[in-house]
Image (spheres, rainbow, N blue to C red):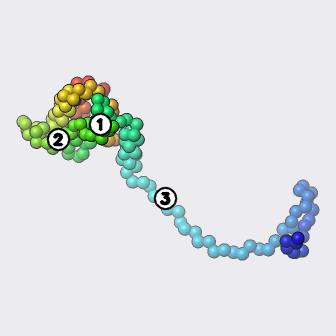
Amino acid sequence: MVLGNFTGQQFKTCDLFGTCLHPSNFLPMQSRRVCMMPIVIEARANTRTESAKIRNRRIQKKFNGTPTKPRLSVFCSDKQLYAVLVDDQNKKCLFYASTLQKSIRENPPCSKIEAAERVGNELVKTCVELNIDEISQYDCNGFARGERMQAFETAIAQHGFLLC
């Protein structure tokens, strides 16, 4: 069985490897038009906040709240503070309070920092009513501690729910 005619290629002996192809007998390669696109590298915006969110999601997978040991999730916006006790096993919210609630804000009128402290005190009262002695995880959603967060945390830490 003959595969093809190889008479155009001449072999030459090489001292090191034995026989090798003679380089003058190779046909020149056809030129191809290669369209080169410029490489554009874009930096990701807000990588610090994105990494905080990613970290928070990873933590939420590890720590799940139970009815006797719920997860405390706190969100602090530019103006308000929101706190939620979550039972992840039964997918229930055991407690919710924010500095927007009239019962917390208006009796007597107070500042945002004092309202955040009142939210912490309401959380402690609810935990005592529900016989909750311990919190499984304090979830601050990757946000830095500000004055309202500190006031909230000190109110909770006074009753032994957080270790500051």
Q: In the rendering, at what x and y percent does residue 21 appear?
A: 86, 66
Quarter of the image where the N terminus is located: bottom right
Q: In the rendering, at what x and y percent does residue 115 appear?
A: 15, 37
Circle 3 residue: 41
Circle 2 residue: 99
Instruction: Identify the secondary structure beneath mark 1.
Output: strand
Q: In the rendering, at what x and y percent does residue 114 appear?
A: 15, 35
Residue 143 location, quadrant: top left
The first of marks 2 and 3 along the sequence is 3
- Checking the image for residue 87, the label placed there is 1
Q: Do the residues labelled 1 and 2 touch (CB within 8 Å)?
A: no
Residue 146 visible at all = no
Pick out the residue farthest to the front. Answer: 90
- Distance Cα–Cα, label 1 vs label 3: 43 Å
Pick out the residue farthest to the left. Answer: 108
Residue kind at label 1, given as amino acid type: Asp
Residue kind at label 3, given as amino acid type: Ile
Q: Which residue is drawn at 30% across and 38% down?
A: 90
Q: Residue at x 49, y 62 (%)?
A: 40
Q: How crowded is mark 3: few (under 14 residues within 10 Å), some or many (20 or more)?
A: few
Front disc: 1 or 2? 1
Q: In this view, does 9 lie above or below 46?
A: below
The first of marks 1 and 3 along the sequence is 3
- Distance Cα–Cα, label 1 vs label 2: 22 Å
The first of marks 1 and 2 along the sequence is 1
Residue 98 location, quadrant: top left
